[in-house]
Amino acid sequence: MALTDEATVVPAVGEYWFHPVVNTPPPADPEDPGADGYVDLGHTSLEDPFTIASEGGEQTVLGTWRNRNLRSVFSPRTEAVAFVLQQWEEENYKLYYGSNAALNEDGYVMVPQNPVPTEGTLFTLIRDGDEVLPLWFPRTSVYRADDITADPEAFLGLPVRATILGRSGETGLYGVAPKSLPGS
């Protein structure tokens, strides 16, 4: 591999977009996901902007009496994107409290007793100056990741976790496009 200084990424700014339909194709124009029906999730935390976390995937070495290190196997792995929503609006409430959180006649979003995670497609656009790094998660299940904690010196946020789910007949979980200039 050649040494390419321009291939590095400083995640200075980022955007989260959500489409309520699972397996929605990535936006034709990463600069305008709304044109393809994606909804902008608005402001998110600067302190915890983006994490792809992985659980599982531990290696076990299997052996026989003749060969103690014959094969290695791995436990199933689950991956998720974690971020903190900072716009207190109905659509974000559904991502945190569950898709069955509903606005009542008094104008309150009622937190359900038995919440249902929200499934859909997540698109993340990381900006590094004029260049962008698009990430497309075709099937996610979004729900609260942590408790809401008030800090008088920070924005109040809704920490969510978008668990990346598999799709029948597909081997890839999500896509990462090459870093590029918009329109290239």
Image (spheres, grey):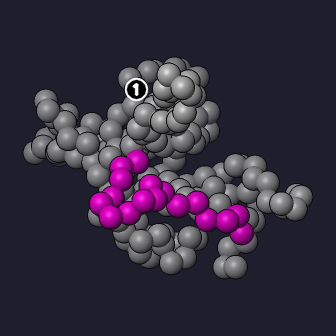
Q: Is residue 6 left or right of residue 44?
A: right
| Residue at mark 1 | 146
Q: Quadrant of residue 144?
A: top left
| Vertical order, 100 against 183 (above or below) | above
Compare residues 42 and 146 and report the one nearer the observer.
Answer: 146
Q: Amino acid at mark 1?
A: Asp
Compare residues 4 and 112 and report the one nearer the observer.
Answer: 4
Element under disc 1: loop
Image spot of residue 73 (x, y percent): 48, 36
Residue at (61% x, 52% y) in the render: 14
Count of marks, rendered view: 1
Q: Residues within 10 Å of mark 1 (few under 14, many from 20)?
A: few
Q: Is residue 20 visible?
A: no
Compare residues 116 and 177 and report the one nearer the observer.
Answer: 177
Q: In the orientation shown, which residue stands out farthest toward the left?
A: 105
Give, as a single range, the part of the protein colored magenta.
164-180
Image spot of residue 1 (x, y percent): 83, 60
Q: Is residue 50 left or right of residue 140?
A: right
- The majority secondary structure of the magenta stretch comes to loop
Residue at (20% x, 41% y) in the render: 116
| Vertical order, 148 against 144 (above or below) | above
- The quadrant in which the C terminus is found is bottom right
Residue at (79% x, 59% y) in the render: 7
Q: Is residue 166 left or right of residue 62?
A: left
Q: Is residue 49 visible?
A: yes
Image spot of residue 177 (x, y percent): 61, 65
Q: In the orientation shown, which residue stands out farthest toward the front?
A: 66
| Magenta region includes residue 106 | no
Residue at (36% x, 53% y) in the render: 166
